[in-house]
Amino acid sequence: MRHHILIPTDFSDNAWSAAQYAIKLYGHEPCTFYFSYAWTFLNSGARTHISQSYIDPLIDQSKEQLADVKERAVKESKNQDHKFETIYTVGSLEDCIEVSIKKHNIDLVVMGTKGATGAKKYILGSNTVSVINKVRLCPILLVPNNCTYVKPDQIAFPSDFSRFFGEDLLPITQLADMTKATINVLHIKGKDGLTEIQNTNFEMLKAHLKDYPHTFNWLPSHRTKADVIADFIKENNVKILTMINYEHSFIENIIKEPIIKKLGFKSKIPFLVIPRKD
C-alpha cells in the first residue's frame, strides 16, 4: 500500500520539523509526499495599489522555496520508495488543502502546530485551528516544533464511549499496525459509571481492538480532563496522542483554549486528529 501524505509548508522551522517527522514515521513505507504552499495576498484590500511587478517576485521566491524544501526532503529520506512532489496553489490554506486531498487521494495531512509567526503562549497556531475545524476529509497529524522523532510504541486514545466505533478507528489501528505500538484507551470515570449505551460501545471497541496490542485505562476525574490525560502521557511515555473530532467533543475544548498551561503536556508529542465518519 502506497501512502499519499500532504505536508503544507510556510517554510518555517516548525513546518520542516513536521516534514522530518513524517519522513521518519513512514521511513519503511512506500510513500508519495506532497509539499504544498498556499499563496495568499494578505493585504487584499489594498491590492489595487500594488503593482504586479511587486507581486511577481514574491511568487517566484515562494516557488523557489518550495522547490528547496522538496530537495531537502529528498536528502532527508533513506527510502528509495519515497517520492516527493510539490503543489503550488493560490487561495486560503484550508481550501488548498481540501483541493489537494481530493485531487491526489491524500490519506494523511501532516503539519506543524505553529506557523512562522506563531506566538509562544498558544498551543496551536490560528491556521492550525482553522484547518482542524474546516478540513474533515482525512486525518491530520500535528507535529510540535523541535519534536524529535522517536518510534511511537505507545499511542493514547481518550474516549468517553459515547459514540459508535467504526471506520473512525482505522487511522489508529493502521498506525499501531505500522509501528507495532500499543493502543492505550483512556477513559475518565464519571460518578455514575457507564450507561447502557457506553457499555455497548465499550464492548464494541474491545472487539475492534482484539487483534492489536492494547490496554484500557480507567482514570480518576478529580482533576481537569487535560491534566489527567497529560499525567498519563508523561507517566507512560506516550509518543502520539490520538482523538476523534466529534462535534462537541473534548478536542473542541483543547483547540479553543489558547494558553499552553491548560494542557499539561504542552503539545510536546504529535497529535493525530481524526475526523468523524458519519
Image (cartoon, rainbow, N blue to C red):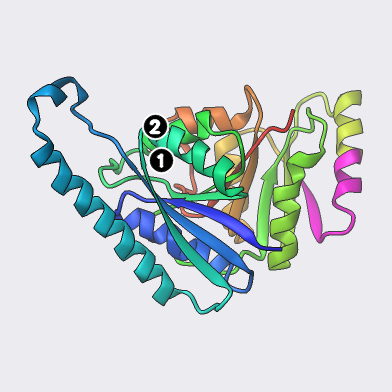
* Quarter holding residue 30: bottom right
In terms of secondary structure, where does tag 1 sit?
A: loop
Q: Is residue 145 left or right of residue 245?
A: left
Q: Is residue 26 left or right of residue 67?
A: right
Q: Quadrant of the N terminus?
A: bottom right
Q: Residues within 10 Å of mark 2 (few under 14, many from 20)?
A: some
Amino acid beneath label 2: Pro
Q: Residue at x 55, y 78 (%)?
A: 80
Q: Position of residue 4 (x, y in %)?
A: 59, 56
Q: Examine the structure image and report whether residue 100 is included in the region drawn in magenta.
A: no
In-front residue for pair 265/244:
244
| Contact? badges 2 and 1 (CB < 8 Å) | yes
Circle 2 sits on which residue? 258
Which mark, residue 123?
A: 1
On screen, residue 144 above or below 46: below
Q: What separation in Å lies between label 2 and label 1 (alpha carbons)?
A: 6 Å
Q: Residue at x 40, y 60 (%)?
A: 17
On screen, residue 82 above or below 141: below
Q: Is residue 115 left or right of residue 229?
A: left
Q: Position of residue 23 (x, y in %)?
A: 51, 66
Give the magenta range: 204-218
Q: Quadrant of the C terminus?
A: top right
Q: Examine the structure image and report whether residue 208 is included in the region drawn in magenta.
A: yes
Which mark, residue 208?
A: none
In terms of secondary structure, where does tag 2 sit?
A: loop
Q: Position of residue 124 (x, y in %)?
A: 41, 39
Amino acid beneath label 1: Ile
